[in-house]
Amino acid sequence: MSQVLRLTRNKQAAASFAKRGFVSAASPSSAFTTTKNGVRVAAIPDSVANQLASVSVVLNNGSRFETATSAGAAHYLKDFAFRNSKKRTAFRKIREAELQGAMLSSEVTRENIIYTIECLKQDVPYFLDQLAEMTTSTLFNEWEFDEIQGHVQLEADIARANPHTLVLENLHKAAFRSGLGNSLFASHTSPISSSSEVEEYFNARFGSNSVAVIGTGISSSDLASLVEQTQLSSLSNNAAVSQLSKSKFYQGAEIHVDASAEHTHYAIAFQAPNPSTASLLAEYLGTNSHVKWCNGISPLGSLSTKLNANISAFSQSYSDVSFVGVNVVASSENIASAVSATINQIKSSTNASQLNAAAFERASSSSAMKAAIASETISGQRSTLSNAIFSSEHKSDAVDANIFASAAASVFAQKPTVASVGNTLSVPYLDTL
Amino acid sequence: MASKIFRAVLRPFSEPWARASGYRKYGLIYDDLIIEESPVAQEALRRLPREVMDQRIFRLKQAFQLSLSFEYLPSNLQPTPEQDKAYFLPLIKQVQAETNEREAFDSLQFVK
């Protein structure tokens, strides 16, 4: 059987789009706009000529919106990406992507679910149409659920086998209890057992005010006008998507999980006033080494060398809360001394005499470097855009040396929240630190 | 158009025909008679919701038993024309469409 399939659905749109040109060097920074019905659109155009573009649909429906009856639904919803929808079967989507050299992916974060297609620039209108059709009319067939469940359980099991992932999950659980504390992964005890429950979770927060389209390698005005031509432009506002209540960071909470391993992972978190302070403080303490095969000279880096442990800082930021944390990995017999040495190091390196202009300079250039590296990759740009798109203001808070010094003093004076995975007989409890 | 006239002509005979063919006397409905020994029907069978599948198995077992004992189901228990609804054929058509789509893609000429 021989058939001719036309793959450029919207030929006119593709033609006018190609004429308009993609590279707009005039505005290298990203811009946030909205369509007429309120779908948020953001894109980062290329600063240099490049063949590659990507479009993503971001659903503001990550694991923080799960309740006791829908725990794990976000993970299942992530796996319902590119499944059968009204106009196209899953098979067709995959074959079309193969034919045009596109890559399909989906990810779940605590706040968002992101469906992404990376493709060549001339195919953007075509794949945006496919993404929009999929977002608005996935069928959630009951018979697809078994297959999805197998994959979801596999991913959850792999995540559970990784102590680093597990300790971060438990840290969130301890610090936020519900909401941001919900697990990213559907556990075996997840109450989700059918497609209709996933569909219900999806519909509860589906509307023009909780959907965003982000792109890279395309300008936001071009992307917005393309979005206007898809089904996403007929979405209406969903009143149930109310402003979320601000997450509360519970200080002094701790979760210790037993795991039979040689090493113990111990994470300590302090609430930070805003994302940029959190990132600066983490960089100041020392995230990971900038030099290969050596721990560096940051306060935590030199401590790592001394204790023969892996101690590094990290920061996590969400739309309403951010925290700075330190991850300590040491052999189980040394974990107690490593953790107390880490706490002492944090205390001593955040007193006023240590927090001079040079320290701030080092932290801010390291943080700027990290941001610059992230902005070079499509996935980095995507995570920057998707983290910012549902927050009300798109500016980052300016931090100078004085604000930095006072923030460091106040942040680390707070009671931390901790989580650990390893030998619970040897881990130090919070009140002993 | 031709099919519309064809339908209109044959429609009045459909109900007496179904009754005369006798499967309802064994408690079956029409979609139970579809031959299931084909890859397409097997896949369609897999997609049946659990409770529909249970009812189908019950009807088939009941029909075998009735046939063995040379009996008919009491008329008050026999499926009514309203109960004789297609539950299996739509799924077979869906799977057939997917198979056709796969064949089309496997032998496609790419026009861009």
Image (cartoon, grey):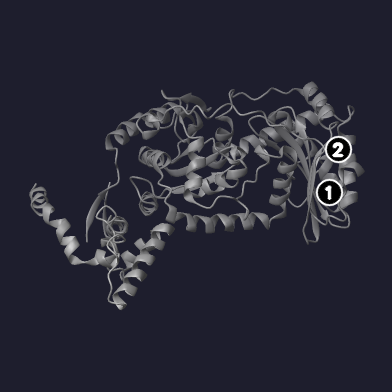
Q: Residue tagged by mark 2?
A: A346
Are discs 1 and 2 less than 8 Å apart at CB?
A: no
When the figure is inspected, residue A38 is found, relative to residue A15, above or below; the finding is: above
**Which numbered disc covers residue B62?**
none
Q: Amino acid at mark 1?
A: Ser
Q: Quick one: which residue is furthest to the bottom in this view? A: B68
Tell me the quarter of the image containing the N terminus of chain A. Answer: bottom left
Q: Amino acid at mark 2?
A: Ile
Q: Is residue A27 visible?
A: no
When the figure is inspected, residue A221 is found, relative to residue A306, above or below; the finding is: above
Expressed as whole percent of the image width and height from the top left, the position of residue A171 reads 74, 44
Mark pair 1, 2: CA separation? 13 Å
Residue A138 shown left or right of residue A87 in the figure: right
Expressed as whole percent of the image width and height from the top left, the position of residue A165 reads 69, 50
Residue A80 shown left or right of residue A62 in the figure: left
**Of the pair A335 and B110, the residue shown nearer to us:** A335
Task: Determine crowd level at label 2: few under 14, some 14-19, many 20+ residues with C-alpha closer than 10 A.
Answer: some
**Which numbered disc covers residue A304?**
1
Q: Nearer the viewer, mark 1 or mark 2?
A: 2
Q: Secondary structure at mark 1?
A: helix
Of all chains, the one bearing label 2 is A
Task: Determine crowd level at label 1: few under 14, some 14-19, many 20+ residues with C-alpha closer than 10 A.
Answer: many
Q: Secondary structure at mark 2?
A: helix
